[in-house]
């Protein structure tokens, strides 16, 4: 329908919206001003006919088996929490999220699972990888990614016709990173600060150490200190937020 028709039907007449697909955001961020930001993922990815549910994993809110059976996509976004510390201290909700990731991977291959930063680390750890601290530093910058050929060979990437020569830049904000991938994972991109920047497992898991959810302003602000990125010139700084948003959107919506 046109915008006018849509407004008349679903806003004025309050016609019932038929839910065709279900999605979840699994939030592992207990700091209120940060986890509220994750709600911004709704308007980025949500479209008509979808139901999105927000789960506060740190309060033991997680999808039930009944909900997982109807689910098409899951996002596990970033967090200010230290995965290394959480694991060492035996935090209860952490184990439940690990169990959920393993359950989705083993029993629900039709669910597209997207991991961002802390979420990527959780997925790697849950499926047999390792996460460690970055020595004596917290990475907060924008990185030019070195993309592997396997990235462009994924079916859902091929369909986007991304130029293979295009420079892709992603925002970074983390003090820990993935140091070993699960056995069945494929490395898709690296950077100067992290060997493992993007990885995939099969067709239904995609994970970013960086933040494809952060916008151009954030990337430009971070990159202003980076001579490597500034070498492109102030007017030609490669901004990849739109490309990464397209990739994440297309990944979440695809059928397995």
Image (tube, rainbow, N blue to C red):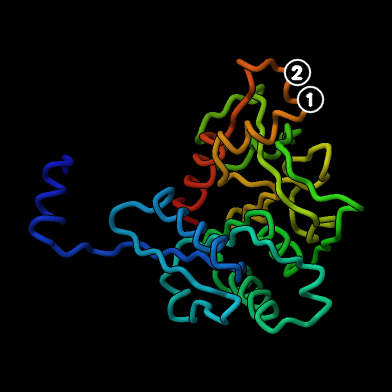
Residue 42 or residue 254, whichever sits in front: 42
Residue 69 or residue 230, whichever sits in front: 230
Say which residue label 1 marks.
Answer: 228
Callout 1 secondary element: helix
Q: Position of residue 249 (x, y in %)?
A: 48, 46
Indicate left or right for 251 with 7 as reference: right
Indicate left or right for 10 with 168 as reference: left
Say which residue label 2 marks.
Answer: 231
Residue 132 or residue 218, whichever sits in front: 218
Outermost residue, right direction? 135
User: At 65% across and 61% down in the image, what residue appears?
Assistant: 79
Q: Quadrant of the N terminus?
A: top left
Q: Position of residue 70 (x, y in %)?
A: 41, 71
Q: Is residue 80 visible?
A: yes
Residue 186 or residue 175, whichever sits in front: 175
Callout 2 secondary element: loop
Give the spatial CA distance, label 2 vs label 1.
5 Å
Q: Residues within 10 Å of mark 2 (few under 14, many from 20)?
A: few
In the rendered image of this protein, does residue 169 appear above or below residue 50?
above
In the rendered image of this protein, does residue 238 appear above or below residue 148?
above
Q: Position of residue 87 (x, y in %)?
A: 79, 75
User: At 49% across and 77% down in the image, what residue appears?
Assistant: 63
In the rendered image of this protein, does residue 78 appear above or below residue 188?
below
Residue 51 falls in which quadrant of the image?
bottom left
Q: Residues within 10 Å of mark 1 (few under 14, many from 20)?
A: few
């Amino acid at each position: 329908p046109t915008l006018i028709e849509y407004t008349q039907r679903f806003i004025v007449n309050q016609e019932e919206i038929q839910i065709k697909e279900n999605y979840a955001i699994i939030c592992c961020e207990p700091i209120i001003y940060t986890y509220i930001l994750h709600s911004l993922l709704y308007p980025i990815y949500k479209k008509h006919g979808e139901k999105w549910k927000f789960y506060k994993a740190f309060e033991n809110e997680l999808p039930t088996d009944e909900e997982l059976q109807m689910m098409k996509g899951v996002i596990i976004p970033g967090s200010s929490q230290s995965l290394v510390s959480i694991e060492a201290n035996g935090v209860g909700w952490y184990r439940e999220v690990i169990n959920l990731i393993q359950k989705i991977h083993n029993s629900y291959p039709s669910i597209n699972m997207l991991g961002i930063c802390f979420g990527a680390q959780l997925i790697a750890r849950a499926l047999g990888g390792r996460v460690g601290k970055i020595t004596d530093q917290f990475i907060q910058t924008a990185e030019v990614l070195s993309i592997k050929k396997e990235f462009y060979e994924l079916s859902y990437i091929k369909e986007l016709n991304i130029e293979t020569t295009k420079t892709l830049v992603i925002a970074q904000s983390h003090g820990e990173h993935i140091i070993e991938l699960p056995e069945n994972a494929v490395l898709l991109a690296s950077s100067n600060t992290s060997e493992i920047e993007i990885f995939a497992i099969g067709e239904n898991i995609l994970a970013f150490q960086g933040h494809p959810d952060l916008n151009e302003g954030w990337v430009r602000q971070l990159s202003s200190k980076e001579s490597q990125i500034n070498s492109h010139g102030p007017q030609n700084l490669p901004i990849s937020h739109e490309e990464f948003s397209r990739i994440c959107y297309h990944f979440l919506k695809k059928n397995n």
